Image: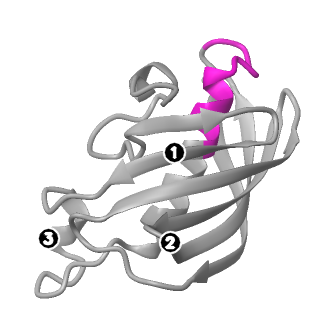
Amino acid sequence: MVTENIEALLPHRKPFLFVDRIISCDEKGSVSERKFTEDDFFFKGHFPEYPVVPGVILVETMAQAGGSALSYQKKFEEGCLFFLGTVDKVKFRNQVRPGDTVRMEVVNLRVTSHMVKQSGKAYVGETLCAEAEWMCLVGKAN
C-alpha cells in the first residue's frame, strides 16, 4: 500500500471523499480502494429498500482515485484542483452495494500541467462493475 492519507492529496472531504487508500501508482496509472458502508449518505435515498451506489458516484470515485495518485506523485503544483471536464464511454456492468470494497484501476492516457485524461475500471473482487474515460482540467482556485 502506498498511502491512506488521501485528505493530504485531494481537497474533497467527507461525505464526498471516495478514496480510502492508494495501493499502487506509477507513470502508467494506479490502483486504489474504497469501501462503501451503509453510513454513506446516498444510500438513504438511492433505493432505501435495496441500496445501490449511484453510477455517478462510481465515476467520481474513479476520478478521485486517479487524481489522488497523480497528486501523490507530485505531478502538479501544490494546491491545484481537478475539475471534471468530460466523461465518456461510461458503462455500468454490476451493482455496488453497502459493504462492498471497490478496487479502481486507473490508466493515465495523457497528463499535462493543465489537463488529465484517464480511463478506469471499478471492480468488486474480480467482478467488473463500471468503466469510464474522463478528462479533468487542472488549476488553482481563484
Front disc: 2 or 3: 2
Q: Which of 25 and 63 is in front in this view?
A: 25
Between marks 3 and 1, how big is the CA–CA gap?
25 Å
User: Does dot 3 land on a helix, a strand or a loop?
Assistant: helix
Between marks 2 and 1, how big is the CA–CA gap?
14 Å
Q: Which mark is residue 32?
A: 1
Percent across and percent down for residue 101 are: 34, 59
Counting the numbered discs, the total is 3
Q: Is residue 64 above or below residue 40?
A: above
Q: Answer with the quarter of the image where residue 48 lies.
A: bottom left
Q: Which of marks 2 and 1 is nearer the N terminus?
A: 1
Q: Which of 25 and 14 is in front in this view?
A: 25
User: Does dot 1 land on a helix, a strand or a loop?
Assistant: strand
Three-letter amino acid code at disc 1? Ser
> Which range of residues does the magenta coloring cover?
66-78
Q: Residue 126 carries which label?
A: 2
Percent across and percent down for residue 99 are: 22, 64
Within-10-Å neighbours for mark 3: few <14, some 14–19, many 20+: some
Percent across and percent down for residue 18 are: 39, 47
User: Does dot 2 land on a helix, a strand or a loop?
Assistant: loop
Front disc: 2 or 1: 2
The answer to whether residue 51 is left or right of residue 8 is left
Three-letter amino acid code at disc 3? Lys
Identify the residue under disc 3.
44
The answer, for residue 142, to whether it is visible in the render is no
Three-letter amino acid code at disc 2? Glu
Within-10-Å neighbours for mark 2: few <14, some 14–19, many 20+: few
The answer to whether residue 96 is left or right of residue 120 is left
